[in-house]
Amino acid sequence: MARAARDPEERIRERNMRLIIKAGIEIFARKGFDGTRIAEIAEASGLPKANVYYYFSSKEEIYRAIVAHLIASWDDALKYISPEREPAEAFRLYIRAKLDYTRKNIAESRLFASEIIQGARFLKKKDRDHMRQVTDAHVAVVEGWIAAGKLLPVDPRHLFIMLWASTQYYADFEPIAADGLKKARLKAEDYETAAITITETILKGILPAPESGS
Amino acid sequence: MARAARDPEERIRERNMRLIIKAGIEIFARKGFDGTRIAEIAEASGLPKANVYYYFSSKEEIYRAIVAHLIASWDDALKYISPEREPAEAFRLYIRAKLDYTRKNIAESRLFASEIIQGARFLKKKDRDHMRQVTDAHVAVVEGWIAAGKLLPVDPRHLFIMLWASTQYYADFEPIAADGLKKARLKAEDYETAAITITETILKGILPAPESGS
DNA sequence: ACAAAAGCTGACCAAAGTGTCAACTTTCGA
DNA sequence: TCGAAAGTTGACACTTTGGTCAGCTTTTGT
């Protein structure tokens, strides 16, 4: 078998696969699956094309590896919706964490967006089921808060869609977001203001409180 | 010159260009610019490839024609933010109109999203300037409402980004939105619930009104 | 030191892609 | 009716792309 005496840290293999994945994320995000040429990934990763094929047997394999890795890296940012917390604090933390993740992983966020727009062709059932379960758990928590009178009776699923949409927009559609904010590029402080605005709006709305004697 | 006696309704030319554009919107939306092959557009429009080239001299020309046409078709849906209106009613109408537009023009919406994710390479300065102006006008109206005490002091630009994001998500990321709602596909009624949830949340938030005697 | 495994890569190929063209048919105003 | 403009298209030229491969160099455990 192709099994033998070696493995000290897997240095070379690990490093090159990381380079390829990293370059792949950038380019797949910008060009989509069909629009990406592996020659471009090779160039961006500083490796000859044939060397890329030494590690991955096809374009699809690179893409799938990236998507799978991406889904796995999300759960961290989404652990704030938990029944013990007060809703206001939970949403505040969730929104900030998600904006933070997208800001620091812009290419990954866009790659995922691109994959979905193109029909979620390579999103495995396993991954979708996992995402659904996480959502279901969050929905249950929100329903509990509503039942306890801690939240107004809002549709939890649409509420989460609002949160996903609002927090991803800045990274995925940066050119439009930047235009909307009259800036050339988005900076950390813009994400900060976004976090505050989204949180405040979701929690308290934008209408002044009605006179307390209707 | 190639100018002569004809033009009765431009029937053939008009019809074929429309077929090509229509097919182009679908396929560009799904594959992005680089991922789209004109042979596929030809097939989808029922015309031979060479005939497509009779009307458009390149893939880029088809794409540009679509993007330009798309931007132009938007202003209608966005006319509700106007100072004479009461804010609550204005936002309600705006959100509903935008959701309605995206639902009825899913492919166009996705094509635009795709173009932005891919770096807004073919969005002309003129179009961006136009969008900026419309936004500036809306922002001014919201600032007026805030100054008049009709709205809480929210950042208007981030508020609009929230609205854009929330209203586009259902069309652009339908697979995820559908999963989130536990449905196989989104229907008109889902857009209806979305409109209500977004409007209510934006206007009043999700926290119960605090006791009126702090 | 050394052999076997791992890593590397220029050159190549078949398939697919964009865009062209010359010759043909259809349309239409006078 | 008839000629010119418009429309049509199969076949072709040229380029790019995904993927292969044989033979090379480097690494590594013993």
Image (cartoon, coloured by chain):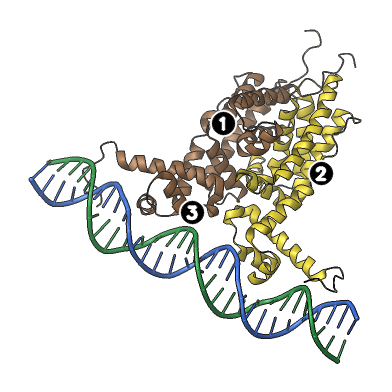
Chain colours: A brown, B yellow, C blue, D green
Residue pointed to by mark 2: B75
Residue pointed to by mark 3: A37
Q: Between marks 2 and 3, how big is the CA–CA gap?
A: 37 Å
Q: How many residues crowd around disc 3 within 10 Å: few (fewer than 14), some, or many (20 or more)? A: some
Classify mark 1: helix, strand or loop: helix
Residue A202's x, y, as percent? 71, 26
- Say which residue appears at 77% left-offset and 50% top-offset: B104
Horizontal side of residue B27 vs B203, given as left or right:
left
The answer to whether residue B48 shows anywhere in this view is no
- Residue B181 position by quadrant: top right
Name the residue nearer the viewer: A93 or A186: A186
- Say which residue appears at 57% left-offset and 37% top-offset: A133
Residue pointed to by mark 1: A103
Classify mark 2: helix, strand or loop: helix
- Residue A58 position by quadrant: bottom left
Q: How many residues crowd around disc 1 within 10 Å: few (fewer than 14), some, or many (20 or more)? A: many
Horizontal side of residue B184 vs B146, given as left or right:
left
Q: How many residues crowd around disc 2 within 10 Å: few (fewer than 14), some, or many (20 or more)? A: few
- In this rendering, is residue A38 above or below A142? below
Residue A38's x, y, as percent? 45, 53
Residue B158's x, y, as percent? 71, 29
Q: Nearer the viewer, mark 1 or mark 2?
A: 2
- Residue A201 position by quadrant: top right
- Could you say which disc has been placed on residue A113 in the image? none
Q: Amino acid at mark 2?
A: Asp
